[in-house]
Image: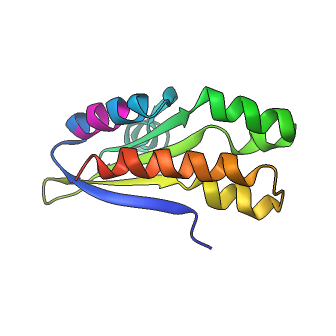
Amino acid sequence: MNFVLSTRAHGTIDDVETRITAALKESGFGILTRIEADKVLKEKLGVDTAPYRILGACNPQIAHRALAVRPEVGVFLPCSVCLRQEEDDTVSVWALDPGTVVETLGDPVLTPHGAQARSLMKKALASLT
């Protein structure tokens, strides 16, 4: 099973973060958390890494419906969207595939919610290319 949706976008990490945040918002997702992992690693370990961001994205309507069915599904929320600046002026973008995550639970009532979230996440990623 592949739990990751991915794409590459041209630009700086700041530019791509702005674009993916807007695309996610258009698809009903909000950003609940934002971690600058490269800065955390520098501060905690003294290591230099490529710029790397982790965004916690959540679609409240889908999350509410899924939590109403199985409250423990909250361990998978929010969906992580990761961005890493590459050396060739592109940014790698990876997102948790909510459809695959839901499929692992084997609950047919949740499957449509995961499929909808996957479709919206794929749409947001596709907007970057």
Horizontal side of residue 46 vs 75, given as left or right:
left
Indicate the position of residue 108 as horizontal and vertical percent values: 81, 57
- Residue 100 quadrant: bottom right
Indicate the position of residue 103 as horizontal and vertical percent values: 72, 62
Q: Residue furthest bottom?
A: 1
The structure residue drawn at horizontal position 49% and vertical position 26%, both measured from the top left corner, is: 30
Q: Is residue 49 visible?
A: no
Residue 5 against residue 119 in the figure, above or below: below
Q: Is residue 64 visible?
A: yes
Horizontal side of residue 52 vs 100, given as left or right:
left
- Residue 19 quadrant: top left
Indicate the position of residue 11 as horizontal and vertical percent values: 15, 45
Q: Nearer the viewer, residue 21 or 92?
A: 21
* Region of the chain picked out in magenta, as a range: 16-21
Q: Quadrant of the N terminus?
A: bottom right
The structure residue drawn at horizontal position 53% and vertical position 44%, both measured from the top left corner, is: 80
Dominant secondary structure, magenta: helix
Residue 84 is one of the magenta-drawn residues? no
Horizontal side of residue 114 vs 40, given as left or right:
right
The structure residue drawn at horizontal position 81% and vertical position 50%, both measured from the top left corner, is: 109
Total label count?
0
Q: Nearer the viewer, residue 96 or 36?
A: 96
Q: Nearer the viewer, residue 22 or 39?
A: 22
Indicate the position of residue 112 as horizontal and vertical percent values: 69, 50
Image colouring: rainbow
Horizontal side of residue 89 vs 100, given as left or right:
left
The structure residue drawn at horizontal position 85% and vertical position 39%, both measured from the top left corner, is: 69
